[in-house]
Image (cartoon, rainbow, N blue to C red):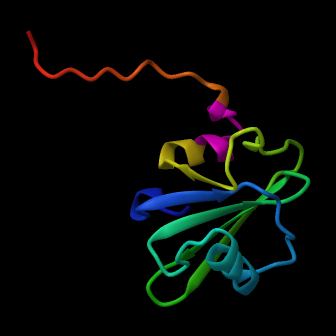
Amino acid sequence: MIRLEAFTRIFIHKAPVDFRKSINGLSEIVQNEMRLDPFSRYLFVFGSRDRKKVKLLYWDRTGFALWLKRLEKAKFPWPRKIEGDVIELSARELEWLLDGYEFWKMKPHETLNYACVS
């Protein structure tokens, strides 16, 4: 498994991609459609039209690496109703996505910001 904490950011390409595309085609999507640097320490996530497959693309200092996961029965939840063509995820959210959780429907505790303690 990929060590997700090795990446500074994780991005999901929301629209499904042609899964015949490999490293060259996906890295062109990163550069031309997502407007991101494919040689960065970012991890890029792509989904298939049938939502049964995901591909993860990243640069690992000496070349590109491509990771594929295919589900035999279920489908990956996909953030179709979230605005934007590119969505940034945390490592934890990507783990949830790969495990089948629709994390974008979950509501966390409200973030509180205080200026002082008393």
User: Going 81% across and 78% down the picture, which residue do you hit?
Assistant: 21
The residue under the point 82% across, 51% down is 71
The quadrant the C terminus occupies is: top left
Relative to 21, is 2 above or below?
A: above
Magenta part of the chain:
96-104
Query: Residue 95 magenta-drawn?
Result: no
Q: Is residue 44 left or right of residue 60?
A: right
Q: Is residue 95 left or right of residue 109?
A: right
Furthest residue to the bottom?
A: 62
Q: Could you say where residue 110 lies in the image, as x and y percent from the top left?
A: 42, 19
Does residue 32 lie above or below 14 as drawn?
below
Against 100, is 118 above or below?
above
Instruction: Classify 61 as above or below 44.
Output: below
User: Please, what is the dominant secondary structure of the magenta stretch?
Assistant: helix
Write the residue at 58% across / 48% down. 94
**Residue 55 position in % (x across, y down):** 71, 65
Quarter holding the N terminus is bottom right
Front position in the image: 95 or 38: 38
Q: Residue at x 52, y 58 (%)?
A: 10
Residue that protrudes farthest toward the top in the picture: 118
37 on left or right of 32: left
State the image coordinates of residue 5 (x, y, percent, origin top left).
41, 57
Q: Position of residue 40 (x, y in %)?
A: 46, 76
Q: Residue 86 or 95: which is nearer the viewer?
A: 86
How many badges with numbers are in the image? Answer: 0
Q: Can you tell which quarter of the image residue 77 is in? A: top right
